[in-house]
Image (cartoon, rainbow, N blue to C red):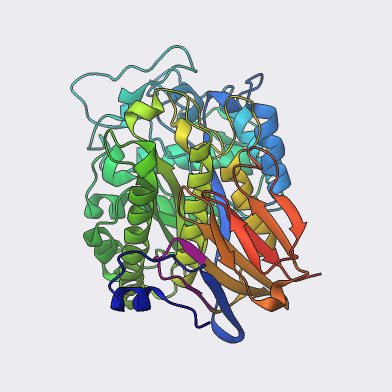
């Protein structure tokens, strides 16, 4: 009997039809591009990474086990005592240099990532360097959040010698064994770490409401100063919260920089957020729509970069999802972590196709009061969650240099399933993700049988993804599942 399709039902005047099973199609011989993308993450310094904190040990173990390159480290302004090494302005008789609270977390990070490229970003400028009506206080308790610390929009020293002096001393502390302070006194650290990349500030379009012109002047001064301490270091610029084209047009134009200033890499961020008061049942639509819009915006920014600075690389070093405020203030349901993991897999495919060099998930550790929805470690049981495991799954299977092949899904219901085939060192790989909060079966090609499939879904939870042999021509993807098919039998 001839199979009746949905179109046939409509012609017969029947108002319903049964959806056909989506079919995965791939042409392994049709190489569409070569990937230049490296998956990685950022680590934000916060109290849960301090010695004795509940999340510290498992977080460092996960970071070491990941063995990732281009990991970004950011001590950040909400915890001034954990991020700023000189909290008070120097006087004629004393300075306030103090690394005692900063070093334990920073050295943990440097040791956990030893042998890998890292991107360091002590993003918080000492607040006293900015003009304000009165001094801005910071919490006496290092673990207490101080959201108001980042005040001020104009540096008090327009020559920027004060600013660059702070950063060259800080960098020397970790790379040159110590530094001489403003009063001529030597501070010995004994540290001689390698820092291959330094990123200049974080989200300057938000944290100090800078203009592209102001930031570019600071970047140039910082780049010149950093090069005096670390002549081989690459300098990363922008780290923008938003994708305002004016910033890219100005900053990437060499005419707006002093002669000889390198623009080695730019960076910017995206968090696909839920809408205000939106119920979780609708998250799958809003966050994936926003992720898709971002990928489209990246293509536009890439055109600006190729036109003005074709040799400059791009690191999108903060990628994540946000819940709404109501959900953030209560225990986050387990399915959310799988949704967020699926979004990162979606970002990875889209940004790889866009030619992005580094694709960084945010962030290793979050917890209530400190963006719990972006944590890659479950702050309840201190185990790596689905957001960590999706990064490891991708990192362990798909490297820069992999070949992308023509891949598509025949699905008359839309784009619920996204897939991309890769060939990595001659081994075929297939990354598949389910965008929806429902189980979806997908028909796979006959040559997939006998290969290994690794599934990250609600069944695996906070444990490693589940691996099994593919013995059927149909795979069921649970809600927000991410799957990796590996043909290295």
> Foreground: 67 or 324?
324
Q: In this view, does 60 lie above or below 347?
A: above
Is residue 484 shown to the viewer in this render?
A: yes
Q: In this view, does 360 lie above or below 352?
A: above
| The C terminus: image quadrant | bottom right
Question: Could you say where residue 100 lies in the image, as x and y percent from the top left?
Answer: 59, 22
Q: What residue span does the magenta drawing correspond to? A: 407-418
Q: Residue furthest top?
A: 140
Q: Which residue lies furthest to the left in this view?
A: 133
**Residue ID at (57%, 50%):** 478
Question: Could you say where residue 318 lies in the image, as x and y percent from the top left?
Answer: 45, 48
Is residue 159 shown to the viewer in this render?
A: no
Q: In this view, does 337 lie to the left or right of 211?
A: right
> Foreground: 98 or 273?
273
Q: Is residue 196 left or right of residue 204?
A: right
**Residue ID at (43%, 65%):** 18
Q: Which residue lies furthest to the right in this view?
A: 489
Q: Is residue 383 above or below residue 361?
A: above
**Which quadrant of the structure image shows residue 144?**
top left
Question: Could you say where residue 411 lies in the image, as x and y percent from the top left?
Answer: 45, 70
Does residue 438 belong to the magenta stretch? no
Question: Could you say where residue 415 lies in the image, as x and y percent from the top left?
Answer: 41, 65
Q: Is residue 115 left or right of residue 4?
A: right
**Residue ID at (42%, 44%):** 321
**Which quadrant of the structure image shows residue 37?**
bottom right
């Amino acid at each position: 009997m001839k199979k009746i399709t949905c179109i046939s039902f409509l012609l017969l005047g029947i108002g319903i039809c049964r959806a056909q099973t989506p079919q995965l199609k791939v042409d392994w011989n049709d190489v569409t591009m070569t990937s230049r993308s490296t998956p990685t993450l950022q680590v934000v310094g916060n109290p849960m990474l301090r010695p004795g904190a509940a999340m510290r040990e498992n977080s460092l173990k996960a970071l070491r086990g990941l063995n990732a390159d281009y990991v970004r480290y950011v001590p950040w302004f909400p915890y001034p005592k954990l991020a700023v090494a000189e909290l008070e302005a120097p006087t004629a008789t004393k300075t306030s240099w103090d690394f005692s609270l900063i070093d334990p977390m920073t050295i943990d990070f440097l040791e956990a990532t030893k042998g890998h490229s890292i991107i360091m970003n002590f993003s918080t400028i000492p607040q006293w360097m900015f003009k304000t009506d009165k001094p801005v206080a910071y919490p006496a308790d290092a673990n207490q959040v101080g959201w108001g610390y980042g005040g001020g929009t104009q540096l008090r020293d327009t020559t920027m010698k004060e600013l660059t002096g702070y950063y060259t001393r800080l960098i020397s502390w970790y790379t040159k064994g110590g530094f001489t302070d403003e009063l001529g006194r030597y501070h010995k650290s004994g540290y001689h770490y390698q820092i291959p990349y330094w990123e200049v500030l974080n989200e300057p379009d938000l944290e100090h409401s800078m203009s592209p012109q102001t930031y570019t002047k600071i970047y140039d001064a910082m780049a010149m100063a950093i090069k005096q301490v670390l002549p081989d270091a690459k300098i990363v610029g922008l780290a923008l919260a938003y994708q305002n084209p004016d910033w890219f047009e100005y900053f990437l134009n060499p005419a707006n920089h002093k002669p000889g200033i390198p623009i080695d890499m730019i960076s910017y961020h995206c968090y696909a957020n839920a809408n205000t008061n939106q119920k979780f049942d609708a998250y799958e639509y809003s966050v994936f729509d926003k992720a898709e819009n971002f990928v489209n915006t990246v293509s536009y920014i890439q055109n600006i970069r190729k036109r003005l600075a074709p040799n400059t690389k791009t690191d999108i070093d903060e990628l994540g999802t946000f819940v709404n405020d109501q959900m953030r203030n209560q225990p986050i349901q387990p399915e959310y972590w799988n949704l967020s993991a699926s979004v990162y897999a979606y970002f990875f495919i889209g940004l790889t196709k866009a030619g992005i060099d580094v694709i960084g998930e945010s962030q290793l550790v979050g917890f209530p009061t400190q963006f719990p929805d972006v944590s890659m470690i479950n702050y309840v049981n201190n185990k790596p969650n689905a957001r960590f495991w999706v990064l490891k799954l991708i990192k362990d299977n798909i490297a820069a240099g992999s070949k992308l092949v023509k891949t598509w899904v025949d699905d008359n219901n839309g784009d619920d399933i996204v897939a991309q085939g890769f060939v990595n060192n001659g081994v075929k790989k297939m990354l598949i993700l389910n965008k929806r909060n429902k189980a979806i079966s997908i028909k796979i090609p006959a040559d997939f049988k006998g290969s290994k499939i690794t599934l990250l879904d609600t069944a695996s939870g906070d444990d490693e993804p589940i691996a099994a042999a593919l013995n059927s021509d149909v795979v069921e993807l649970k809600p927000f599942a991410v799957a990796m098919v590996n043909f290295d039998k």
